[in-house]
Amino acid sequence: MKRPHNQRRSVLYDVILKRFEIPDEVRTFAKGKFELVHIGGMTIGRATYEPGWKWSEHVGRALGKKSCDVEHVGIVVSGRATAAMDDGRIFELRPGDIFFIEPGHDSWVLGEEPYVSLHLLGAANYAAHK
């Protein structure tokens, strides 16, 4: 059956908008928090750490771990922090840096400004109590 020329098929495309101000989940720990947003089959995280925060103390201790075993891909929004690899290498993360960090590292905030980063890979498993 042929449709009249004035009837067009409607196609709807989904658009989902979310904000970290209204996250799907928040994982809190001393001197920091990790906000998660689930969107488009992905989990994206925003890490916010206060001066004095250290992964091995404020996250790892509660998990019974000495180093982080999560792989990260992310972007530094503000502040500075380290990625201290288990082999002794230490890298400084600064605003605008896009990072890939393999499992087997510690991290801590540098300076007196809070550190904020967005995590595009590894967010689902980060600081998760399993």
Image (spheres, rainbow, N blue to C red):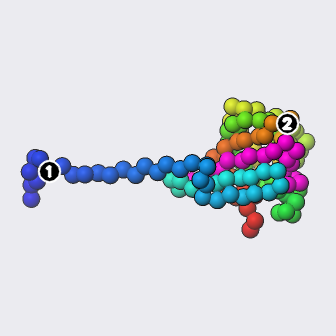
Task: Please provide percent x and percent y for residue 21.
Answer: 61, 49
Inspect the magenta stretch and tell me whether residue 99 lies in it.
no
Answer above or below: position of 81 versus 31.
above
Q: How far apart are marks 1 and 2 (CA)?
A: 63 Å
Question: Which callout, 1 or 2, points at the residue further toward the start of the chain?
Answer: 1
Q: Is mark 1 on a helix, strand or loop?
A: loop
Question: Could you tell whether 67 is left or right of 79 in the image?
Answer: right
Answer above or below: position of 94 versus 128.
above
Residue 121 visible here: no
Residue closer to the observer: 74 or 45: 45
Q: What stretch is highlighted in magenta?
A: 42-58
Q: Which residue lies furthest to the bottom in this view?
A: 130
Q: Dot 1, crowdedness within 10 Å: few (<14), some or many (≥20)?
A: few
* Quarter of the rendering containing residue 92: top right
Residue 93's disc is: none
| Residue under the image location 74 percent in, 46 percent down | 48
Residue 66 visible here: yes
* Quarter of the rendering containing residue 60: bottom right
Q: Residue furthest right?
A: 88
| Residue under the image location 9 percent in, 55 percent down | 2
Q: Dot 2, crowdedness within 10 Å: few (<14), some or many (≥20)?
A: few
Question: Could you tell whether 79 is left or right of 43 in the image?
Answer: right
Residue 7's disc is: 1
Q: Residue furthest front?
A: 21
Query: Which residue in the protein does label 2 denote?
Result: 112
Answer above or below: position of 37 versus 75.
below
Task: Please provide percent x and percent y for residue 127.
Answer: 75, 58
| Residue under the image location 85 percent in, 42 percent down | 51
Task: Please provide percent x and percent y for residue 85.
Answer: 85, 44
Inspect the magenta stretch and tell me whether residue 45 lies in it.
yes
